[in-house]
Image (cartoon, grey):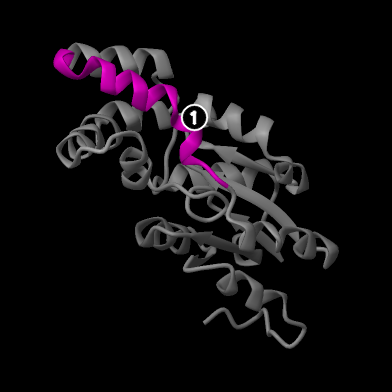
C-alpha cells in the first residue's frame, strides 16, 4: 500500500489567520492581509509556479500601496506559518518500517517548498512526491494526481490519499485513489493496524 499525504494541515500546520494574528494585533488589518495575500489570485499563481515570492509581493504592494509595510511583513515571515504536526510526523517511520510506499502531494509555492525541504528532515523518509509549483498544476486538477501516479508507477487502487480538503479528496477518488479526509493522525494510523483489511477502504 502507498500512503500519500498532503502537506499543509496534514504534515505541517497552515493556519493563515492565526499567523496574521501573531503579527498584527489589529483585527481589521488581519482581515485585510488575509484577503490581500492568502485569498488572492497571486497566491494561487505562486502555488502553480507561475509567480515568485518577490513578484507576488510586488503585485500586492502595487494593488494596495497603503498597506505595503504590512504586506512585506506578512510575506517576509511566511516560514512561521509552517510548523510540523508531530502526531503525523511520528507515523512516517512506522509506515516505512511496514514496507509501505510514502509520498507527498501538495499545493505549495517554490520558496515554501525550499524552506520545508531544507528545514525538516522528515521529508527524507518519503519515496518521492510532487509539489504543485514544479508541475504547474494544482489540486484538485485531475492532472496533478495523474502526474504522481505516472511518475512513480503507482496503481490508484493501491494508494491511500490523505488531505484536509474535501474537494481534493473527491478529486482523488475520481482518479481511482482511495481518498480519505484528514481529520488527524488517527485516520492514517488505522491503516497500519495488522487487523485492517486493506481491500476494504470504506
Most frequent secondary structure within the magenta stretch: helix
Numbered label tally: 1
Q: Residue furthest bottom?
A: 195
Is residue 69 depicted above or below 97 in this figure? above
Is residue 172 depicted above or below 132 in this figure? below
Q: Is residue 189 left or right of residue 112?
A: right
Residue 143 in percent (x, y) is at: 46, 42
Residue drawn at x 70%, y 63% as measured from the top left: 91
- Dividing the image into 4 quarters, which one contains the N terminus? bottom right
Is residue 3 depicted above or below 13 in this figure? below
Residue 192 in percent (x, y) is at: 72, 75
**Quarter of image, res 148:** top right
Q: Identify which residue, 11 or 171, lies in the foreground.
A: 11
Which residues lie in the magenta part? 64-83
Residue bearing mark 1: 133
Residue 50 in percent (x, y) is at: 40, 21
Q: Identify which residue, 144 or 77, lies in the foreground.
A: 77
Residue drawn at x 26%, y 15% as measured from the top left: 59
Residue 119 in percent (x, y) is at: 66, 34
Residue drawn at x 56%, y 73% as measured from the top left: 187
Residue 168 lies within the magenta run = no
**Quarter of image, res 199:** bottom right
Q: Residue furthest front?
A: 25
Q: Is residue 180 left or right of residue 200?
A: left
Is residue 143 depicted above or below 101 in this figure? above
- Disc 1 is placed on an element classified as helix
Q: Is residue 133 left or right of residue 197?
A: left
Residue drawn at x 60%, y 27% as measured from the top left: 114
Mark 1, Cα crowd under 10 Å, few <14 / some 14-19 / many 20+, is: many
Amino acid at each position: 500500500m502507498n500512503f500519500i499525504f498532503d502537506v499543509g494541515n496534514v504534515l505541517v500546520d497552515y493556519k493563515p489567520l492565526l499567523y496574521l494574528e501573531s503579527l498584527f494585533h489589529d483585527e481589521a488589518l488581519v482581515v485585510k492581509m488575509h484577503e490581500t495575500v492568502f485569498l488572492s489570485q497571486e497566491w494561487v499563481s505562486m502555488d502553480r509556479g507561475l509567480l515568485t515570492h518577490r513578484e507576488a509581493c510586488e503585485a500586492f504592494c502595487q494593488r494596495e500601496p497603503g498597506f505595503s509595510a504590512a504586506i512585506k511583513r506578512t510575506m517576509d515571515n511566511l516560514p512561521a506559518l509552517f510548523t510540523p504536526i508531530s502526531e503525523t510526523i511520528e507515523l512516517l517511520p512506522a509506515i516505512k518500517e511496514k514496507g509501505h510506499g510514502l509520498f507527498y502531494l501538495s499545493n505549495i509555492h517554490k520558496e515554501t517548498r525550499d524552506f520545508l525541504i531544507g528545514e525538516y528532515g522528515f521529508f527524507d523518509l518519503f519515496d518521492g512526491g510532487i509539489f504543485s509549483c514544479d508541475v504547474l498544476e494544482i489540486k484538485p486538477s485531475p492532472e496533478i494526481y495523474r502526474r504522481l501516479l505516472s511518475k512513480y508507477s503507482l496503481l490508484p487502487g493501491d494508494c491511500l490519499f490523505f488531505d484536509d480538503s474535501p474537494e481534493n479528496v473527491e478529486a482523488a477518488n475520481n482518479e481511482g485513489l482511495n481518498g480519505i479526509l484528514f481529520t488527524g493522525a488517527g485516520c492514517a494510523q488505522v491503516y497500519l493496524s495488522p487487523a485492517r483489511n486493506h481491500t476494504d477502504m470504506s
